[in-house]
Amino acid sequence: MDIGVSAALLVLLAPLLLLIAALVKLTSKGPVFYACHWVGQGERPFTGYKFRTMVSNAEAMEAELQDRNEMRGPAFKLTNDPRVTAVGKVLRKYSLDELPQLWSVLIGDLSLVGPRPPRAHEYARFTEFQKQKLAVKPGITCLWQVEGRHRINDYDDWVERDLDYIRRWSLWLDIQILARTAVVVFRGTGA
């Protein structure tokens, strides 16, 4: 399912992907894509890509913003992040910045549904409890994203949802999460 759906979506969405790439390039300095250094199943590192939604030196600026982090634990979340570009705000609102991850699904680094992969520097701060989420292949979408991703501010609560997904996994659950993700995307509830 992962390979078939991701291949079909990459073909169908090719015009949109090109349009987004042009908008990112024309409206801010820096590359079109942001290389994500993630840790996946079995603690295997891999690189995935998103459309760049922040200024080109955003990673360097993260340390300056740590005192404003709204997430307890190793992840960094900030409402109204000053690093996000104007186009980036729209891309994030509708989760369009995530579309390049379909390539990662096609090549087998990600699944359509599964726990979101941690960034490598976040993983370095994981507890043994948090490492349990790496028992399965990570995904583009997950329970956390459809069950109030902006209301969850404790990373352990996020991991609880990931572990719940792992315990209850079924093809039917994946289909339900994908359908709920489509609703979240069309409503534009991302940030």
Image (tube, grey):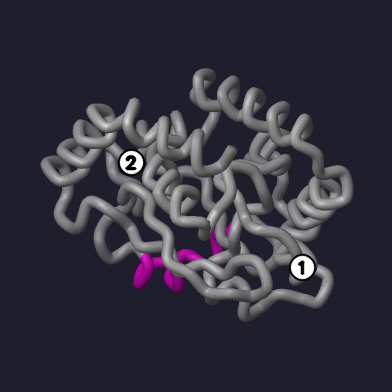
Residue holding disc 1: 130
Q: Residue at x 71, y 35 (%)?
A: 174
Q: Residue at x 33, y 41 (%)?
A: 88
Q: Residue at x 20, y 57 (%)?
A: 31
* Helix, strand or loop at mark 2: helix
* Helix, strand or loop at mark 1: helix
Image x and y of residue 23, in percent: 18, 36
Image x and y of residue 57, in percent: 28, 66
Q: For this rendering, which residue is in front, 164 or 81?
A: 164
Is 15 left, or right, of 91 in this rendering?
Answer: left
Image x and y of residue 84, in percent: 35, 48
Query: Is residue 1 magenta-colored?
Result: no
Q: Are marks 2 and 1 in contact (CB under 8 Å)?
A: no
Q: Which residues are magenta?
A: 59-70
Circle number at residue 88: 2
Is 67 left, or right, of 29 in this rendering?
Answer: right
- Vertical comparison of 133 with 51: above or below: below
Asked if residue 70 shows in the view, the reply is: no
Q: Residue at x 50, y 19 (%)?
A: 186
Circle number at residue 104: none
Q: For this rendering, which residue is in front, 172 or 159?
A: 172
